[in-house]
Image: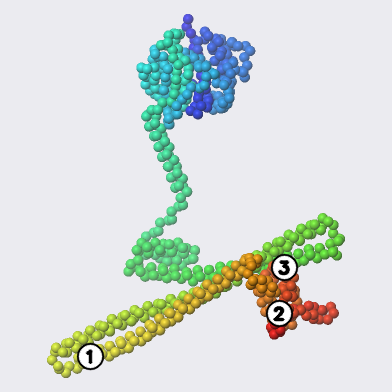
C-alpha cells in the first residue's frame, strides 16, 4: 500500500553550555505515515493545532487548543519561532519531555526523563564540531547524515571504525541542536540485533578549523572596533587652525592693515609670528617687518589702558557692593530694633501667643542673617587691609631688588671697562718698548718725528693710567655700596622673621593651656589683665580716651571698639575698665536729666600713685 507523507516542523528543547534549556527550531521536514493516526494526532496536538484527517475531518472532536496532550510543550502562539517572532523563554522548573523521532532508515528513542542530563565538556571558543559516540556497528555515513541533518547544514563528517565520528556544522548554534540528541537510543529499521542499536553520546569537539575561524572573526571584530574608535576620535577632534599664507608684498600690506584694526589684531599677530619663525625676514623685507612690529607695539598702550579700565571697574563694583552691604546691614539693624521694641512688656502683653512666637522666630532669623552679613563685611575689610600691607612689603622689596640689580650691572660694566683699559695700556707699553728698541739699534740722529711720537705715546699712557685709577676707585665705591645693600637686605629679612615669630607666639599664647603649674602664671592670674586680648583692649581704650580729654560714655567707647571687632560686649569692657582703677576713672557730668556717666583716662596720675 502506498503511504502519504506530510512535512512537519519539529520544535525541540536543547541544552546550552550553561545547562540552561533553550528552545531550538529544527526546520528539517520529517515524514509521518498517515496510516498511523495516533502519531499524527500527537504531533499536531504538540503544535497546539486541532488534528485533522486527510479529508479535513477532526480526529479528536473534543480538542482544546489551550491544553496539550504532552506536558512541557506549550500551545502554538504568535510568539513561537517559525512565525517570525522570538519565543518566550521556557522557565527552568518546567519538566522537559523528549519525543520519539522517526527517520527514513532508523528510529530515535528518548532517554529516561528521570535520569540527569548527559555530561559535556567545556565548550571551546567558536565550536562548530561535535563528537558523536555510541553509533551502531552497522551504521553508515548516510544514516548519520539522515539523523543530524535535521540540526543544520553539515560541512564535513569524519567517521571512525570504532563506532564514533566527528561532524562539523556550518554555524555554531547548530551544535546546540545536535547536543539535544545526546542520550537517545538509535535503532536501524525494525531490527533488534545489537549491531543495529546504540546509545548516542554527543559532546563538544575541539577542531583547529573552528579555532582558526573564531580567531579570524575576533580579529575582524577588533579591527572594526578600532576603526569605530578612530572614526569617533576624528569626529570629536577639534578642527585644525587654518593654514597661514606665504609671505608676499600683497599679503604683507593686508596684515599691516589688520594689525591696525583692534578686532583683527590677534589673527594678524599670529600670521606675523608664523612668518618670522619661518625665516621670511631678509634685507629686502626687513623694513616691512619692522613696520609691522612697530604697529604691534602700538597696541601695548591700548592693552594697558584696557587693563586699567577693567581694574577701575572692578574697584567701583567692589565699592558699590560694600555700600550696598552696609545699607542692608543698617536696614537689618532697624528691623532687629523693631523686634526688640516689640518684645518689651508695653507692647508684648497685647500680642497673642502665636504672634509672640512668630515675632521671636523672626527676631532670631534676622539676627542670624545680620551677623552673617556683618562677618562678610568685616572679612572684606580685613582682606583690604591685608592687601595694603602686602603691597607695601612688596614695594619695599622690589625697590631694594631693583637698586641691587642696578648696582650689580654698574659694577659689571666697570669691570669690563677696567679690563679693556688694561689691555689698551699693555698695547701702548709694547709699542713704546718697540720704539725704544728701534731707537737703540738705529744711529742717533735728531729725528723730530720720532720724538713727537714718543711724547704723544707717553702722554696717552699717562692719561690711560689716570683713567684706570679713577675707574678702580669707582669700582671700590660700588662694591662698598653693594655690601651695604646686602647688609640692609639681611636686616630686613631678620626683621621679617622676627615678625613672623611674634605672630606665631601670639597665636600659641591664645591657644596655650591656662592650667599649667608655673608660678609666673599664678602672678599673671592675680593681675587685673588676664589675657593679651584685654591688654590690647586697654591700649586701644587708652588712646581713644587720650584723644577725648573730657571723657566718653561707655556706649561711645564700645561703638568704636565694635568697628574693629563686632564680638566685643559692653559689659566686658565696663568690667575691665572697673578693674583698672589707676588707669580709668568714672565721673558723673551734667545736671538733672542731662546727668551722664563718663569714663576718663587717668594713667599719668595713677603712675605717680603706684
The residue singled out by tag 2 in the image is 583
Q: In the rendered image, is residue 313 in sight?
A: no
Q: Nearer the viewer, mark 2 or mark 1?
A: 2
Give coordinates of residue 304: x percent, y percent.
51, 70
The residue singled out by tag 3 in the image is 330
Marked residue nearer the N-terminal end (3 or 2): 3
Q: Secondary structure at mark 1?
A: helix
The residue singled out by tag 1 in the image is 454
Q: In the drawing, does residue 43 fall left or right of residue 254?
A: right
Quarter of the image for the C terminus: give it.
bottom right
Give coordinates of residue 19: x percent, y percent.
51, 27
Q: Nearer the viewer, mark 3 or mark 2?
A: 2
Q: Secondary structure at mark 2?
A: loop
Whole-number angstrom distance, CA of label 2 to CA of label 1: 89 Å
Residue drawn at (38%, 32%), measured in percent from left and top? Answer: 212
Marked residue nearer the N-terminal end (2 or 1): 1
Q: Secondary structure at mark 3?
A: helix
Amino acid at each position: 500500500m502506498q503511504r502519504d507523507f506530510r512535512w512537519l516542523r519539529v520544535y525541540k528543547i536543547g541544552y546550552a553550555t550553561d545547562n540552561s534549556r533553550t528552545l531550538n527550531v529544527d526546520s528539517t521536514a520529517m515524514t509521518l505515515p498517515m496510516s498511523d493516526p495516533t502519531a499524527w494526532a500527537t504531533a499536531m496536538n504538540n503544535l497546539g493545532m486541532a488534528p485533522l484527517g486527510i479529508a479535513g475531518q477532526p480526529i479528536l472532536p473534543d480538542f482544546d487548543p489551550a491544553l496539550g496532550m504532552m506536558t512541557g510543550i506549550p500551545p502554538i502562539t504568535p510568539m513561537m519561532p517559525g512565525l517570525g517572532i522570538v519565543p518566550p523563554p521556557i522557565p527552568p522548573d518546567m519538566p522537559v519531555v523528549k519525543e520519539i523521532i522517526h527517520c527514513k532508515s532508523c528510529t530515535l528513542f528518548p532517554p529516561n526523563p528521570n535520569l540527569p542530563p548527559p555530561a559535556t565538556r567545556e565548550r571551546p571558543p567558536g565550536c562548530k564540531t561535535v563528537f558523536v559516540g555510541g553509533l551502531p556497528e552497522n551504521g553508515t555515513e548516510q544514516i548519520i547524515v539522515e539523523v543530524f541533518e535535521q540540526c543544520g547544514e553539515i560541512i564535513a563528517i569524519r567517521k571512525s571504525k570504532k563506532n564514533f565520528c566527528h561532524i562539523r556544522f556550518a554555524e555554531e548554534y547548530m551544535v546546540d541542536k545536535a547536543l539535544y540528541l545526546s542520550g537517545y537510543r538509535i535503532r536501524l529499521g525494525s531490527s533488534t540485533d545489537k549491531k543495529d542499536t546504540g546509545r548516542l553520546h554527543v559532546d563538544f569537539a575541539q577542531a583547529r578549523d573552528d579555532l582558526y575561524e573564531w580567531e579570524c572573526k575576533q580579529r575582524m571584530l577588533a579591527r572594526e572596533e578600532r576603526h569605530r574608535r578612530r572614526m569617533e576620535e576624528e569626529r570629536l577632534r577639534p578642527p585644525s587652525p587654518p593654514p597661514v599664507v606665504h609671505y608676499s608684498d600683497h599679503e604683507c600690506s593686508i596684515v599691516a592693515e589688520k594689525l591696525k584694526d583692534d578686532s583683527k589684531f590677534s589673527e594678524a599677530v599670529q600670521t606675523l609670528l608664523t612668518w618670522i619663525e619661518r625665516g621670511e625676514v631678509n634685507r629686502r623685507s626687513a623694513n616691512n617687518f619692522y613696520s609691522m612690529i612697530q604697529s604691534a607695539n602700538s597696541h601695548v598702550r591700548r592693552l594697558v589702558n584696557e587693563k586699567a579700565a577693567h581694574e577701575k571697574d572692578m574697584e567701583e563694583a567692589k565699592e558699590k557692593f560694600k555700600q550696598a552691604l552696609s545699607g542692608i546691614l543698617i536696614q537689618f539693624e532697624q528691623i532687629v530694633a523693631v523686634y526688640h521694641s516689640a518684645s518689651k512688656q508695653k507692647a508684648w502683653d497685647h500680642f497673642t501667643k502665636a504672634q509672640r512666637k512668630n515675632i521671636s522666630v523672626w527676631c532670631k532669623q534676622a539676627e542670624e542673617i545680620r551677623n552673617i552679613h556683618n562677618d562678610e563685611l568685616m572679612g572684606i575689610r580685613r582682606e583690604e587691609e591685608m592687601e595694603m600691607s602686602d603691597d607695601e612689603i612688596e614695594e619695599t622689596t622690589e625697590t631694594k631688588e631693583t637698586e641691587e640689580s642696578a648696582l650689580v650691572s654698574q659694577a659689571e660694566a666697570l669691570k669690563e671697562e677696567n679690563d679693556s683699559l688694561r689691555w689698551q695700556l699693555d698695547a701702548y707699553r709694547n709699542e713704546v718698548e718697540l720704539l725704544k728698541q728701534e731707537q737703540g739699534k738705529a744711529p742717533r740722529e735728531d729725528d723730530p718725528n720720532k720724538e713727537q711720537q714718543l711724547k704723544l705715546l707717553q702722554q696717552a699712557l699717562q692719561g690711560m693710567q689716570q683713567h684706570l685709577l679713577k675707574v678702580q676707585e669707582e669700582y671700590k665705591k660700588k662694591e662698598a655700596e653693594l655690601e651695604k645693600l646686602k647688609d640692609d637686605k639681611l636686616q630686613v629679612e631678620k626683621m621679617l622673621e622676627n615678625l613672623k615669630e611674634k605672630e606665631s607666639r601670639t597665636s600659641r599664647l591664645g591657644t596655650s593651656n591656662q592650667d599649667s603649674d608655673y608660678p609666673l602664671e599664678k602672678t599673671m592670674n592675680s593681675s587685673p589683665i588676664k589675657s593679651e586680648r584685654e591688654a590690647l583692649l586697654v591700649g586701644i581704650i587708652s588712646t581713644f580716651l587720650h584723644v577725648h580729654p573730657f571723657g566718653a560714655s561707655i556706649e561711645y567707647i564700645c561703638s568704636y571698639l565694635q568697628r574693629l571687632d563686632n564680638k566685643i560686649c559692653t559689659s566686658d569692657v565696663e568690667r575691665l575698665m572697673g578693674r583698672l582703677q589707676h588707669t580709668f576713672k568714672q565721673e558723673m557730668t551734667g545736671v538733672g536729666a542731662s546727668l551722664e556717666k563718663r569714663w576718663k583716662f587717668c594713667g599719668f596720675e595713677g603712675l605717680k600713685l603706684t
